[in-house]
Structures are given as structure tokens and as C-alpha cells.
Amino acid sequence: MLTVLESLQLSTEYLEKKGIESARLNAELLLAEILNCKRLDLYLKFDQPLKENEVDKYRELISRRGKFEPLQYITGKAEFFGLTFKVNSSVLIPRPETELMVEAIIERFKTADVLRILDIGTGSGNISVTLAKFLEKCFVTTIDTSDEIISLAKENAAQIGANANVNFIKAEMNSYSTDGVPFDLIVSNPPYVSMADYSETQREIREFEPATAVTDFGDGLTFYKLISSRLNNILKTGGSIYLEVGMGQAANVSAILQECGVRNINFIKDYQQIDRIVYGELK
Ligand code: GLN
């Protein structure tokens, strides 16, 4: 029977051969998933033999990862802002850059009174649910286009205990309108990869993440233009807007926002020193 250590070694070698980055880490995380333990606890179990059903299950997960399926879709979960979100291939896997946007909003509005927030593009619910969880006085409305996505995000809200102040609506951005009261804050991490760049994305993204969550099938700026053109209907005067943008898009997005009346525009850099978040206020 294979031990934990032997299984890790064989799987790491296999994933390396397939061209998976951080092969050992992936092998460890998948085995920890099967043994239902923390990754580092594996180091205390190196000599433990795996049961036959564990080996079978491990082989299956490693083979999926070897075909470039993202780890988070295999385990069915992703960490975001210290919270665990259930994910599947209908939603984008939450990214660390998006945590920076959420962090900036929480920091700025933590003492604010009732804040009505609109999050455009729910996905797993990472942005809306995290804001609802940490800004207790806020009320978040979030829109996305499919029942499957909304039901997953609702599940996450319930699991995380933030469902009381999030409202999920199935709607397209170009036809969505508020019930008359504009929002205090708009936030979005829209699909911003251009059609031209999409074919250059990692296999994990291109072959497994939903294309409609990643690319606008255009110049990458479609959603910024759409959101900006509707600001006067959905954001109150003096209200704030926070947008995540792709590499090299910050200046363009800033110009688009400016043209639609947004002022005091600023950028936040990501871990690679790329301008990643653009924010400002509607005059
Ligand atoms: N809000 C989700 C996220 O940031 C989904 C975004 C999207 O689908 N483009 O991950």
C-alpha cells in the first residue's frame, strides 16, 4: 500500500510532467482534501498507508488537475477575505486582487451609516457577501444573469451568515433599473479580458472558467462603458464607484468614468504594482 509520502511524491511528479505550476502544493492540497485534514497535518502522517478507496479517489482528483482543471473547482471551494466560498464552473474563482477592492471599501465605509450598495456581476457572491458580512449597516443588491449563479451565491450568503442584508436579482446590466432610489456605492469586477487577450490566458482559465465572466468578447472595456453610461440612473450624486480593471486599462477606464461625470478618480495597485482598482465619486 502506498504511504502518504509516496503518494505525494508520485502525484507531484505526475503533475510536474503535465506542466502544472506548484505541483507539490497542488498534490498536497488535494490529498489533504481526501484525508479531511489541514495541508500541514500531512507532514505528521507521512508513513500512514492510504486505504484503497483513498488511493482511488486521489488518483481521480490528480488526474483532473493534470488536465488543468483549477484546484478550486475540484475541491468545490475558494478562500476569499478569510471566508470560504463554494464555487463551481458556473462562476469565476475569486481572486486576491478583488480582495484589495473589498478591503478598501470596508476600510473607507466601516463607520458609515446605512449604505446601499450595488454589486454588478455576482459570481460566487464573493464581493456582495463579504461586504454584507463586514459592513453590518450596509444593504447590498447584486445582479447576475443566471439562476444557477444566483442560487450558488445565495447558498454562500446563507453559509457565511450574511443573507439578511444581501438581495440577489437576476438581471442584465443594460436593462437593470433601480426601484427609483439610486445607490450610494457601485462596485464591480466585470469581465475585462479583451477578445484578443483571451486566447492567451492560462489553460485553467480558458478551458474551465466561464468565458462570459472573463471576457467581454470585445475590446475589454465594454462593461466599463455600459456601467458608466448608466451611472446617472443608478448612482446618487456624490456616490462612489469602485471598479476592478485589467492590466493597462486604468487610464482608459478613468477617462470613460470622467466623461460620465465621475470625479476625484484614484487607483489602487495590486501585488504586482499594477493599477488594479479605479474609484471615484459621481459629481
Ligand atoms: N464578483 C465576482 C468576482 O469578483 C464575479 C465577477 C465576474 O464574474 N466577472 O469574482
Image (spheres, grey):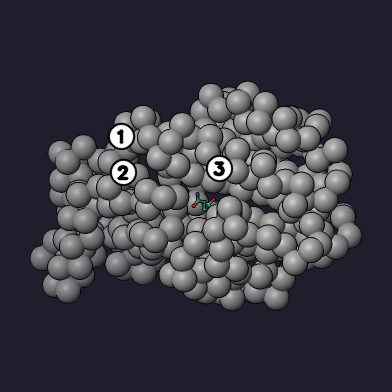
> Is 114 positioned to the left or the right of 22 in the image?
right
Which residue has dot 2 on it?
206
Which residue is located at x 57 percent, y 35 percent?
245
**x then y, percent, for residue 235:** 77, 50
Decide which of 192, 107 is in the foreground and name it: 192
Count residues near mark 2 (Cα–Cα under 10 Å), then give few for <14, some for 14-19, many for 20+: some
Work out whether residue 223 can be spotted.
Answer: yes
Residue at the spot 89% in from the left edge and 60% down from the top edge: 113
Q: Quadrant of the C terminus?
A: top right
Q: Earlier in the sequence, mark 1 or mark 2?
A: 1
User: Which residue appears farthest toward the front when viewing the image?
Assistant: 175
Residue with the mark numbered 3:
223
Amino acid marked by disc 2: Arg
Image position, residue 89 (x, y; %): 36, 59
Q: Quick one: quadrant of the N terminus?
A: bottom left
Q: CA distance from mark 3 to mark 1?
A: 19 Å
Q: Which residue is more in the foreground, 29 or 99?
A: 99
Element on which disc 3 rests:
helix
Q: Amino acid at mark 3?
A: Phe
Q: Earlier in the sequence, mark 3 or mark 1?
A: 1
Mark number displayed over residue 199: 1
Please name whichever residue, 35 or 246, is drawn nearer the observer in this view of the structure.
246
Q: Nearer the viewer, mark 3 or mark 1?
A: 3
Cα separation between marks 2 and 3: 20 Å
Q: Are circles 1 and 2 on residues that touch, CB within 8 Å?
A: yes
User: Cα distance, mark 1 to mark 2?
Assistant: 7 Å
Identified by mark 1, the residue type is Ser
**262 to the left or right of 154:** right
**Badge 3 vs badge 1, beta-carbon distance below 8 Å:** no
Mark found first going from the N terminus, 2 or 3: 2
Q: Secondary structure at mark 1?
A: loop
